[in-house]
Image (tube, helix red, strand yellow):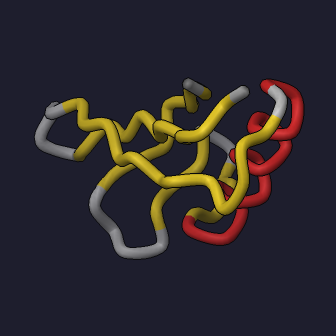
Amino acid sequence: MVKTLIILILLFDGTLIQERVKLPVPSTPYDCLDYGALYASRIATFKENGQYLNDGRGTIQGFICE
């Protein structure tokens, strides 16, 4: 079972960071990926070149479930 969502964020200064989000309940990998897409849509805005964080730090590059 998957317990953590890791969001890969590329900051505008070129730094790649991993933000960890603890899932509310252990989930299947597919549920985690669905949650990742939902979470990304809440913290970022999709534009023609990618998903830009609403706080202006950078872009979402993807996510990992572990």
Image quarter of the N terminus: top right
Nearest the viewer among 20 and 2 is 2
Residue in front for this viewpoint, 23 or 46: 23
Identify the residue at horizontal 66%, vertical 62% (top origin).
24
| Residue 19 higher or lower than 33, as above or below | below
Q: Nearer the viewer, residue 22 or 44?
A: 22
Residue 8 x %, y %: 42, 34
Image quarter hosting the C terminus: top right
Viewed as shown, does residue 36 lie left or right of 21?
Answer: right
In the drawing, does residue 56 fall left or right of residue 43?
A: left
In the image, residue 36 above or below residue 38: above
The reply, left or right, for residue 27 in relation to residue 57 is right
Q: Quadrant of residue 2?
A: top right
Q: Is residue 5 left or right of residue 59?
A: right
Query: In the image, is residue 25 above or below residue 50?
Result: below
Q: How many marks?
A: 0
* Residue 63 horizontal/vertical position (percent): 57, 31
**Residue drawn at 48 percent across, 73 percent down:** 54
Residue name at image x 51 percent, y 54 percent:
22
Identity of the residue drawn at 62% across and 54% down? 23
Residue 41: image location, x then y, percent? 72, 61
Q: Which percent across, then down, holds residue 29?
A: 79, 25
